[in-house]
Image (spheres, grey):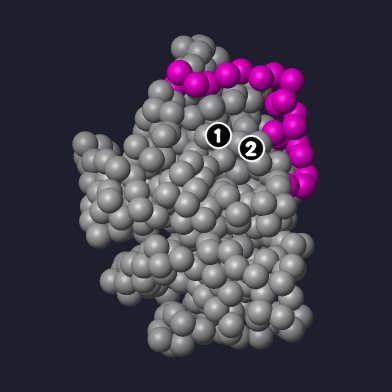
């Protein structure tokens, strides 16, 4: 880990400084370079959820359409926006259980698509979940804004995270106006619209790491942390072979001994080149990924928030420097960052009701892909749409590889690509 010493600045005693971490900011930790390790289980999840997200976005586009359908021409130029690597027309025709194809009334050669009865029913269930868990969504959005430097985030940076954060479609019109005491849309000096936090809420200023330590067997450690001890360890799950290396163990032990700084606290008094700041960056990224429903997001989405989150220019190298906390995937011609602790044996540890519905949505997609026109009858026979807790059917449909630790594959030649690639 990089560590820099003040060469000309004479540091005052920590007892005379208002910053209690000042005497720890020059601590030297051994520098260890780790190989990037491919995890086939997490890659498989990212691959399937890329198609799931694209299909959901197409569903929302049809819902927003005044005609109730979309044409092949209107979506022809959208594969990159949907995260697809194939033409959109080919993709949407794969799933007849969701999208019904019919010819345009005026142009017989122009394919059009509307939602099937199955897709409409899933959309109704999604709207119901958004209403029931609206307070949870508001709290999640408040936490995101509380981490921002100016308690505000540009809408152009927030919209790409709409799916990951579980925000309802068109949240700026459907959700924001209902909570004027929480947030408000304002125009920045550059003319861009931003979402601003109206009031700091202390009850939300507790990170996921703090909450997990408080509720787990490590509750005693968290109580000591609240009494003044500053150390709080990140859970780590190393790829096969890393945990046994002495140099890695020593590095991580020294890292965990550094004080934990909540992502909701100010970092102005921390030297930007210190090990302490690096641990603070790890904490911010850990918290932001914890707030996402699937505990992952695209790296470029995080890059767009760099200034608002007070992150250094090359903060994305953190993901490969701490493979026990984060996993960096290169699937689907993009770069996705996942939180390792969010998954166990290929499944989310604490799935949100909306993620369970998305699993059901994917099961319907897959049924249509395999059985084409017969898929609707099979779905009706399974009764999955009527049973909101039909987890076994959905999980079998997802076909996720369960042996996560056994799927790690060391690929040294792709390490630089994972670290330094600048575009998704």
- Residue 49 location in percent, x, y? 52, 47
Considering depth in this image, is 306 or 176 the residue closer to the camera? 176
Determine if the magenta segment contains residue 127. no
Point out the stretch of residues depicted in magenta: 405-424
Considering depth in this image, is 293 or 239 the residue closer to the camera? 293
- Our reading of the magenta stretch's main secondary structure is helix
**Residue visible at 37% across and 33% down?**
344
- Residue 96 location in percent, x, y? 51, 56
Considering depth in this image, is 337 or 79 the residue closer to the camera? 79
Above or below: residue 204 compared with residue 181: above
Q: How many marks?
A: 2
Mark 1: give few (<14), some (14-19) or many (20+) Cα within 10 Å.
many
- Tell which circle, 2 or 1, labels the residue nearer the N-terminal end: 1
Indicate which disc residue 367 carries.
Answer: none
Position of the N terminus, as image quadrant, is: top right
- Residue corresponding to mark 2: 331
Secondary structure of the residue carrying numbered label 1: helix
Mark 2: give few (<14), some (14-19) or many (20+) Cα within 10 Å.
some
Indicate which disc residue 43 carries.
Answer: 1
Q: Is residue 132 left or right of residue 50?
A: left
Secondary structure of the residue carrying numbered label 2: helix
Distance, label 2 to label 1, CA atoms, is: 6 Å
**Residue visible at 76% across and 80% down?**
190
Above or below: residue 304 compared with residue 171: above
């Amino acid at each position: 880990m990089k560590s820099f010493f003040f060469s000309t600045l004479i540091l005052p005693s920590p007892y005379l400084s208002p910053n209690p971490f000042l005497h720890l900011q020059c601590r030297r930790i051994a520098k260890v370079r780790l190989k990037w390790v491919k995890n086939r289980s997490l890659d498989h999840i990212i691959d399937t959820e890329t198609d799931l997200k694209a299909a959901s976005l197409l569903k929302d586009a049809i819902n927003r359409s005044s005609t109730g359908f979309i044409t092949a021409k209107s979506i022809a130029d959208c594969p990159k926006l949907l995260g697809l690597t194939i033409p959109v027309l080919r993709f949407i025709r794969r799933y007849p259980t969701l999208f019904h194809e019919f010819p345009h009334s005026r142009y017989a050669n122009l394919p059009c698509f509307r939602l099937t009865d199955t897709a409409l029913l899933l959309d109704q269930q999604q709207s119901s979940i958004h209403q029931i868990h609206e307070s949870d969504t508001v709290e999640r959005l408040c936490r995101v804004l509380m981490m921002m430097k100016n308690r505000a985030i540009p809408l152009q940076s927030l919209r790409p995270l709409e799916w990951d954060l579980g925000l309802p479609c068109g949240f700026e019109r459907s959700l924001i106006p209902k909570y004027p005491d929480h947030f408000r849309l304002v125009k920045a000096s550059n003319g861009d619209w931003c979402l601003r936090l109206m009031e700091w809420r202390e009850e939300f200023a507790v990170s996921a790491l703090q909450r997990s330590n408080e509720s787990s067997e490590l509750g005693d450690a968290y109580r000591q942390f609240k009494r003044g001890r500053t150390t709080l360890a990140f859970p780590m799950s190393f790829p096969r072979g890393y945990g046994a290396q002495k140099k890695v163990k020593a590095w991580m032990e020294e890292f965990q001994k550094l004080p934990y700084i909540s992502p909701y606290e100010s970092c102005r008094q921390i030297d930007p080149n210190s090990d302490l700041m690096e641990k603070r960056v790890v904490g911010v990224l850990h918290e932001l990924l914890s707030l996402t429903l699937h505990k992952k997001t695209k790296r470029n989405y995080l890059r767009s928030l760099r200034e608002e989150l007070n992150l250094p220019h090359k903060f994305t190298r953190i993901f490969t420097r701490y493979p026990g906390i984060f996993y960096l995937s290169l699937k689907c011609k993009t770069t996705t960052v996942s939180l390792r602790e969010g998954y166990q044996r290929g499944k989310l540890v604490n799935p949100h009701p909306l993620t369970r519905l998305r699993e059901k949505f994917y099961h319907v997609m897959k049924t249509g892909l395999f059985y084409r026109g017969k898929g609707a009858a099979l779905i009706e026979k399974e009764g999955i749409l009527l049973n909101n807790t039909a987890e076994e059917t959905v999980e079998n449909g997802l076909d996720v590889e369960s042996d996560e630790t056994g799927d790690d594959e060391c690929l040294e030649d792709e390490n630089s690509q994972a670290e330094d690639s600048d575009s998704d």
